[in-house]
Amino acid sequence: MTAAPASADAIRLDSLRKQFGSTTVLHDIHLRAARGRFVVLLGPSGCGKSTLLRVIAGLERADGGRVVLDGRDVAELPPAARGLSMVFQSYALFPHLDVAENIVFGLRARRVAAAEREARLARAASLLGLEKLLKRRPSQLSGGQQQRVALARAIVAEAPICLMDEPLSNLDAKLRGEMRREIRALQQRLGLTMVYVTHDQAEAMSMADQVVLMRDGHIEQDATPAEIYARPASAFVASFIGTPPMSLLPLVAHAGGAGIAGLPDHLLAPASAAGALLGIRPEEVVPAEDGLPACVTAAEFLGAETVLACALGSGGALLQARIPGHHALPPGSPVRLRLPPLAHLFDANSGKRLPLPPFA
Amino acid sequence: MRTSFASRLGLTLETAAAWLLALLWAAPVLYAVWAAFHPTGYATRFELTAPLTLQNFVSAWDAAPFGRYFLNTVLLVCFVTGGQFVLCTLAAFVFARSRSRWMSALFAIVLVQLMVMPDMLIVENYRTMRALGLVDTVFGIGLPYLASAFGIFLLRQTFLQIPAELEEAARLEGCGPWAILWRLYVPLAKPTYLAYGLTSVAYHWNNFLWPLVVTNSVNTRPLTVGLAVFASTDQGIDWAIISAATLLTAAPLLLGFLLFQRQFVQSFMRAGIK
């Protein structure tokens, strides 16, 4: 085997495939992640993100393609030799061992000398504020504390790559926010390359350097959070990112341009865009006297703002609008909404992002 | 009112039945205690003022080589239970975690063993032991019991309940199959080992027929066989001394059960067997 060329990529996946029986769960995955990046694998359940993580970890065997970690092809290496640590969704703490023994479990298995083991335990415990809990059993800890122990066990290995499989999904909302910040800070402080699986787009957007949005075993888009928000690569991405996500309105041809069915007086795009889907971010919609006439179907008050779901025109197009303040509008109320300038167009069949047509 | 009367009557009957069964079960032990601690003359005369004595125990101990019998039984029980732990653990681990498609068929074959009465095999086992030259050895008494289908079944069920994520975490931390078995499965199955160990010890401590067949000297006889030989003819039938000897042989088991009673019952509840 020749030495792999030096590469800045901590993780490189080439044409990775994985099948369970006759169902293919990962199709031809290509992915590169630079050292020290926080990569989030995002997608709805069943999209293959957890399987992808397990293939990287070596817990599942790939059926094709290569997994290259730090320049090494790890296909033949067992999980323990791949230079990575992992935090499981259930935390996978050993119930028969106390917190200290859970944290140093891997160091014992790898026969690290006792003095160094103690030093690393002390460091990891102080990093995560576990000093007072070291003698407890996992069953005597709260969910957040268990989460910390799992994190400590992952970082005590001092592996350059850390994998996390929906680590926050068992915590309540407040704790989740705290742990999110803590994990991000820890990752940056230790310079870890993190691969983090979640189905929560808010979690992905707030933590990631690089968001990999997956669907049905494919990567839909691989970009920074800002890019994925500003330029979603497909209608699926558009409808997945954002709270609430982008509204997709079918455009039909009207005299002189394209617009919503039933609203011929309000042209939204040049005629060539007819038949496509128009993407509108709810936070960019504003109420205005000269706006499009719409009919409220539901109003959801969030505190600082209200999310209005509105029906537009005659085609049943549904638009969501996020409007500052409290607007307790009963269903059926008429409103007028002004849409932002044309920014996102998607092909109605393939869902792919379309280039914006020049205004004629 | 009538329903509450009926249910109270039912409860009373149930309690009475429980007491009756308990008394029936305890009667022989209680009688043995009475006879062993009183002089021979009181074996069938129940007077509260009867004098207490330990002489029966001394006579019993002196009358037969009980010390040697004790040693044989302890050796036998340790050998059988220890061997069962090792073999059943290894087999159960494979049956619980192997993904081979032959596993369920093989496991079914192992379970068939549960339906074969051990006493049916006495003649065949004796032949085998003779062929191996193990007749009249402690090793020979224990050998036929070493691979226990019950133990394999029990441990497999326990191992199956251990979440796969724990094993994956251990693998990621650098454990090979042996380390996973030793550091994860065995410690997590402790209650099962305790419950199974106690039943196995009790069974082999009390086992009579097979040791009777396969042993024929003082140096190998376990307690049960020794007691039977002792209680037969050469002593005459002195119930006081026989009772004392019986209590002596059963004492370690009774003591053990009293000590582990809670864990014993709990682990059987958990293992789902009765």
Image: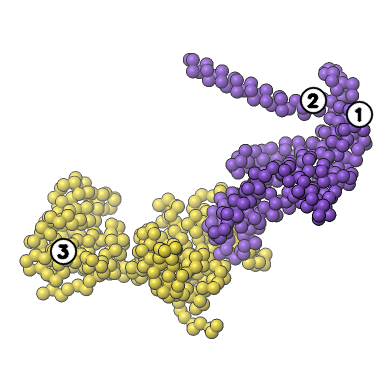
Chain colours: A yellow, B purple
Q: Indicate whether B64 appears above or below B94.
A: above
> Mark 1 falls on what kind of element?
loop
Q: Which residue is mark 1?
A: B236
What chain does mark 1 sit on?
B
Q: Nearer the viewer, residue A239 or A336?
A: A239
Which residue is at 35% across, 71% downward? A223
Q: Which residue is mark 3?
A: A251
> Mark 3 falls on what kind of element?
loop
> How far apart are the two marked residues, 2 and 1, measured between alpha carbons?
19 Å
Which residue is at 46% across, 70% downward? A63
- Name the residue furthest top: B1
Q: Indicate whether B79 appears above or below B36.
A: below
What chain does mark 3 sit on?
A
Identify the amino acid type marked 3: Leu
Q: Which residue is mark 2?
A: B31
Q: Do the residues indicated by labels 3 and 2 lie within the same chain of the protein?
A: no
**Residue B170 image point, x, y percent:** 58, 61
> How far apart are the two marked residues, 1 and 3, measured between alpha carbons?
110 Å
**Residue A278 image point, x, y percent:** 20, 64
